[in-house]
Image: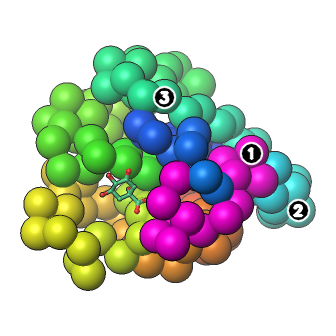
Amino acid sequence: MTRRSIVLINGPNLNLLGTREPQIYGHESLADVVALAKQNAERLDVKLYDFQSNHEGAIVDRIQQAREEGVNGIIINPGAYTHTSVAIRDALLGVEIPFIELHVSNVHAREPFRHHSYFSDKAVAIIVGFGVKGYEYALDFVATSPKFA
Ligand SMILES: O=C1C[C@@](O)(C(=O)O)C[C@@H](O)[C@@H]1O
């Protein structure tokens, strides 16, 4: 059995985690989140690539690259692109890699424009409102579920 590989993608403004609206997104930085994810990936024996960008096209490029790498699954927090990006949706569908959509905050308890997602109907699962703990849950699931084998 080959080792699973996973790409963790964070979209715009998630580089500001820890300092950005901490009452909504908490006090942990993206570097903290990624460091813990790497530790957990090692424990779960999966290869983890991580990527953050504030640019839609760069995220599309990273998703396309994932197919070349033969990645098993994608964990994506598309940030504000959740509510706007047909291009990122098309990239995920184009590469045919199963993915989890993740949000730190409970988008359904926030402004109405955050209630619609271009990803939810195509995601294997959605993690919403668990704070940065959601990244741990997502990694555990992608590393162990037959849906990402
Ligand atoms: O940038 C973000 C972060 C977010 O994806 C979250 O993780 O809760 C929710 C989005 O509505 C917002 O634009």
Q: Residues within 10 Å of mark 3 (few under 14, many from 20)?
A: some
Pointers 2 and 1 in contact (C-beta within 8 Å)? no
Residue 123 visible in the current orientation: yes
> Is 106 covered by the magenta stretch?
no
Query: Residue 148, percent across and down?
Result: 52, 58
Query: Residue 65, percent across and down?
Result: 49, 20
Q: CA distance from mark 1 to mark 3?
A: 14 Å
Picture disc at residue 31: 1
Residue type beneath disc 3: Ser
Residue at which label 2 appears: 43
Residue at which label 3 appears: 53
- Say whether disc 1 or disc 3 marks the residue closer to the N-terminus: 1
Q: Residue at x 43, y 51 (%)?
A: 77
Q: Residues within 10 Å of mark 2 (few under 14, many from 20)?
A: few
Q: CA distance from mark 3 to mark 2?
A: 27 Å
Residue range highlighted in magenta: 20-33
Q: Residues within 10 Å of mark 1 (few under 14, many from 20)?
A: few
Q: Is residue 88 left or right of residue 142?
A: left
